[in-house]
Image: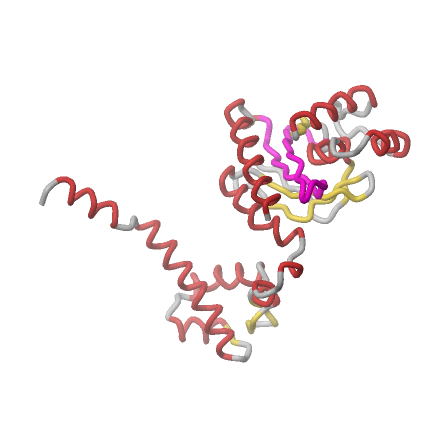
Amino acid sequence: MNEGVQQAQGANQSSPSQSSQVKSATRTLDIIEYVVASGRALVAQEIATALGIPVSSLSYLLSTLVEREYLVRDGRRYSAGPGLARLQASDRGFTLADRAAPLVRTLRVQLNETTSFFIRDGWEVEAIVTESSEQALRYSVPQGRRLPMHALASGKALLGALDDAELDRYFRESERGKFTPSTVTDEKTLRRQIREARKTGYAMTDEEFSLGIVGIARLVLMNGEPVGSLSVAVPKVRFTDDLHARVADLLDRTAGLLEAS
């Protein structure tokens, strides 16, 4: 057998990790199809016996499916969840959070840093989707809690989307508290940062809301209108120039995918 044929055969062989991933994906689909086809709520042992899945593996897969709402759990029993109906919904059936969630998860996997999608609510921002880093040293973003625009990178990115009249009103009406010694609260400095965000599409914070945390965010537009911002929060000890460049590049690509949707 010549070298070229050997190389071709090697390229077609799956690695153990690839085989494991395919097996896990197949099992996940089998679980969904079996539960839906059964037409009744099933206990985990019934699913494990029917599909030949070890209970230890099944537990993780069921938890993931419940978290994503493809299944619902009632006591010990599992049945089809609302996530399955969403997959068949018309375009209008998907919320902004639905559209952002898979992209936020992918961005977190690519960087293994905490990634979020924020929307503006008055003079505050709220994370409607967030995925925490799996590293031991990490920052968690409180989902559903309203946070001040001036102290977060996502907020500064969204401030950059305001027109001059709205921005003037923001400075008249907002309360800009100090969360760390580095929090920027004065109007002159904030306006300079906002001008930079308008020019680049990005905004940054350096230990302004939480000590030891650097944030970088990118504005997201849909049909020319600002709808939110994607952000990544990184412990400062890991925030190198190389990581900064990689985060900015992936934020740009991810925002582009969301804007195209």
Quadrant that contains the N terminus? top left
Would you say 234 lies left or right of 3 here?
right
Would you say 34 lies left or right of 161 here?
left
Is 247 a magenta residue? no
Give above or below for 220 relative to 183.
below
Give above or below for 23 relative to 226.
below
Image x and y of residue 59, in percent: 48, 63
Magenta segment main secondary structure: strand
Quadrant position of residue 184: top right
Quadrant position of residue 186: top right
Give above or below for 70 relative to 164.
below
Q: Residue placed at 55% from the left, 77% from the top? A: 41
Image x and y of residue 68, in percent: 57, 59
- Total of numbered circles in the picture? 0
Please give the range of residues in magenta. 209-236
Image x and y of residue 177, in percent: 83, 31
Single out the residue that lies furthest toward the left. Answer: 1
- Along the line of sight, the residue nearer the viewer: 145 or 155: 155
Single out the residue that lies furthest toward the front. Answer: 223
Q: Residue placed at 80% from the left, 28% from the top? A: 178
Q: Residue placed at 34% from the left, 49% from the top? A: 17
Q: Residue placed at 62% from the left, 43% from the top? A: 259
